[in-house]
Image: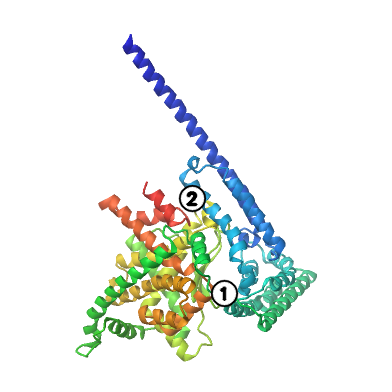
Amino acid sequence: MKKFIIILCISSIFGISKSQNSSSNKISTDKNQTFTEFENKFMNDYWAQFPESSVYSGLHKYDAVLTIPNLENRNSDLNFAKKYLLKLNEFSLNELSDLNKIDFHLIEDQLNEIVWSTNELRSWQWNPGSYNVGGIFAQTLFGKYAPLEVRLKSFQKKAELVPQYFKSAKENIKNPVEILQNLGIAQNEGSLEIFEKNIQDSVKVSKLSEADKNLVLKSSKAAATSIKNYIAWLKNLKPTERRDFRLGKELYDQKFRYNIQSSFSAEELYQLALKRKTFIHTEMAKLAKEMSPKYYGNQKTPTSDFQLIRKVLDTLSSQHVKPEEFQSAIEKQIPDLVKFINDKNLLYLDPSKPLIVRKEPAYMAGVAGASVSAPGPYDKDGDTYYNVGSLSGWSKEKSESYLREYNNYMLQILDIHEAIPGHYTQLVYANQSPSIIKSVFGNGSMIEGWAVYGEQMMLENGYGNSSPELMLMWYKWNLRSVCNTILDYSVHTKNMSKDEAMKLLTDEAFQEKTEAEGKWNRVSVGSVQLTSYYNGYQEIINLRNEIKDKEKSAFNVKAFNEKFLSYGNSPVKYIREMMLK
């Protein structure tokens, strides 16, 4: 009898357990469904609040809208962020799926950053360069998502708001950073081409009525006048007080936390970068000594490692294309990269997503020499552009310095980083992610880190026959990512001067003067973003090493690459949690 009672009790216990598990699973499913509904409503409201962001993401519901950057709009942004933070915190992380947990964090970080940037960073007061409508109008004018006539009408309605936009911009600016004031002048001058030439060309070939054509041209002319007035106002602006372009440690640490979403603190990453710099110098010295007999025979060579590295780099840097061949040389390399990846079976490349190499648009000039512009998640069939800076109008000395930096070896690494399997490939995968949150609020450090990791992955698998020349140039390139972090952190938190920065970049990172000057310009007009390259790279390498240790001989690079990219633009620290389960 006692035995029967025990069995009965055990059966009852298991019955209860099964019932509880079933109930728990139902609650979990319900919570995730509710969270999905929350995400959908949040995104709909987010696009209404930030219409320009929707256009860049490929959603064209708000094409005719231009946000006026005034106090009323800033307060509206704050109210939106605070409202949705309250709604978000109604969910318990423990009840969400792993992928939804990542979305939760991405939404939370985005909303907190809106509050922080509005109230604490306050760049709307000191960054005249942030007021530029060229990019958003270019999206409307050059997009292929709708007939030209539809896009021109959106252009016209939006152009009517440009005078009010720049009126508010002038009211906002109180203590401008001088270099950002100059950037605002240069980039707005570049955007005039859209309103004075490109729009006329488009109107001319459109099927609009004469009345509608005149409306478009009238609005565009008024917009161009407003831009010219803003440029003239900036040129004459001589404030009694100017903000330093350096953020300072407190703001820098906060921005790093929101923008990079790293497993490291800014200080920890800086220390890791210093160690990596020492390692790279050691490896470069070995390669330089190995190549010395090949290039110099019995000639006397420098005894200093740094001088020998510089000498070999100088020799290799003389092998470069002519200025007028720069863009065409990039175009010719793309098919070779595709073939190598396919032959080595490193990663699936979608042949239906072509990459278009083009001259960098004028409204984008002044920040980076090469970049990729990919279609947003709502515009999956849109074109992906590889923007290449033009050397037209450069002096012979400046062109030679730039081309020595982007020599025949470095140009290959640049294409791997920016195009295949770097940014272009990663962004194609990201747009296939089922999570719109991960696509829209993507982590920049994961994106940049993947591009840097991709360089190493290609060389590890035999690209360029792993020649010592290419390896030496890659170490120089990798040193650039490392020194980006050292430079950015040192300038914005340690008051590094331009002379000290140029010494770091030219003497320790072996960069040409023109490249170093460009990097100083970048660190002067922006902050934190330069750390994203090394941070993302280091986090991905750490993760790959962990996966290798776990899987041992079963590790497969293609499987790792595709699994990693399947999580969209998520921060690496969250991808790590998923992949190590």
Q: Measuring 38% from the left and 60% from the top, which residue is drawn there?
A: 539
Rendered location of residue 286, percent (x, y): 24, 76
561 relative to 279, above or below: above
Disc 1 element: helix
Rendered location of residue 67, percent (x, y): 69, 64
Q: From this viewpoint, which residue is outermost toward the left? A: 298
Q: Is residue 347 left or right of residue 68?
A: left
Q: Is residue 127 visible to the viewer in this orientation of the structure?
A: yes
Q: Measuring 68% from the left and 84% from the top, which residue is drawn there?
A: 236
Badge 1: few (under 14), some or many (20 or more) residues near its Cα, within 10 Å?
some
Q: To which residue does mark 2 refer?
A: 102
Q: Which mark is residue 340?
A: none
Residue toward you, 477 or 413: 477
Q: To which residue does mark 1 refer?
A: 364
Quadrant in the rendering for residue 500: bottom left
Q: Is residue 436 visible to the viewer in this orientation of the structure?
A: no
Residue toward you, 336 or 423: 423
Whether pointer 1 and pointer 2 mark residues with C-beta atoms closer than 8 Å, the reply is: no
Gap in angstroms between the C-alphas marked 1 and 2? 32 Å
Q: Measuring 54% from the left and 57% from the top, which residue is drawn there?
A: 441
Q: Is residue 299 left or right of residue 357?
A: left
Residue toward you, 492 or 279: 492
Rendered location of residue 530, percent (x, y): 46, 70
- The N terminus appears in which quarter of the rendering? top left
At label 1, which amino acid type do we have? Met
Front of the two marks 1 and 2? 2
492 relative to 84, above or below: below
